[in-house]
Amino acid sequence: MPIDATQAYDDGNIFAKILRGEIPSTKVYEDEWACAFEDINPQAAVHTLVVPKGRYVSWDDFSASASAEEIAGFVRAVGTVAREKGLVEPGYRLLANTGGHAGQEVPHLHVHIFGGEPLGRMIGG
Ligand code: AMP
């Protein structure tokens, strides 16, 4: 069931639990601002999720309310993960599902990084 991108932050969401170390994840990167781990149900040869450490429900919430430092830290982390995975030269795709029409399921902002193979055009049908 997709979430409402404007709902209040829920500390019980699965990515909050991963950030607190309460449930396992295949972590590939962590710094002061962000954490990255492998998607449990990969949709491409590389499918990594990057989440900010702050309590933000969605891209809408983050872009409206996060500090400039948090935004810079998160954006840099996404770029770092893609570079460290060797995705820049072959190319990669970023996706941030936001709310109902996009099918966002986890109410903690996450950017999907897809790569490792040709990804086709834009979005699926
Ligand atoms: P979205 O539809 O953008 O909210 O995507 C949520 C993503 O989280 C999906 O691609 C799921 O496969 C992924 N996911 C859900 N639970 C976990 C988990 N415990 N560890 C890693 N990825 C997860």
Image (tube, rainbow, N blue to C red):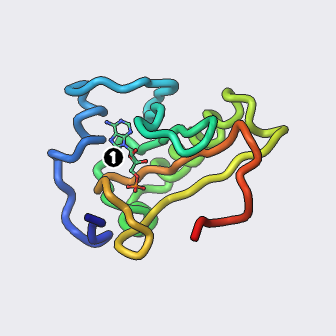
Q: Position of residue 56 (x, y in %)?
A: 32, 55
Residue 64 falls left or right of residue 16: right
Specify the farthest residue to the bottom.
Answer: 101
Q: Can you say which quadrant of the picture contains the C terminus? A: bottom right
Who's the residue at 50% across and 39% down the image? Answer: 42
**Which residue matches tag 1?**
54
Who's the residue at 42% across and 43% down the image? Answer: 51
Q: Please tell me whether residue 15 is drawn above or below residue 68 in the rendered image.
A: above
Q: Please tell me whether residue 98 is drawn above or below residue 67 in the rendered image.
A: below
Frontmost residue, 86 versus 9? 86
Who's the residue at 32% across and 69% down the image? Answer: 5
Q: Is residue 110 visible?
A: yes
Residue 62, image quadrant: bottom left
Q: Position of residue 7 (x, y in %)?
A: 22, 69
Q: Position of residue 29 (x, y in %)?
A: 51, 26
Badge 1, how many Cα within 10 Å: few under 14, some, many 20+?
Answer: some
Q: Is residue 33 visible?
A: no
Q: Can you say which quadrant of the picture contains the N terminus? A: bottom left
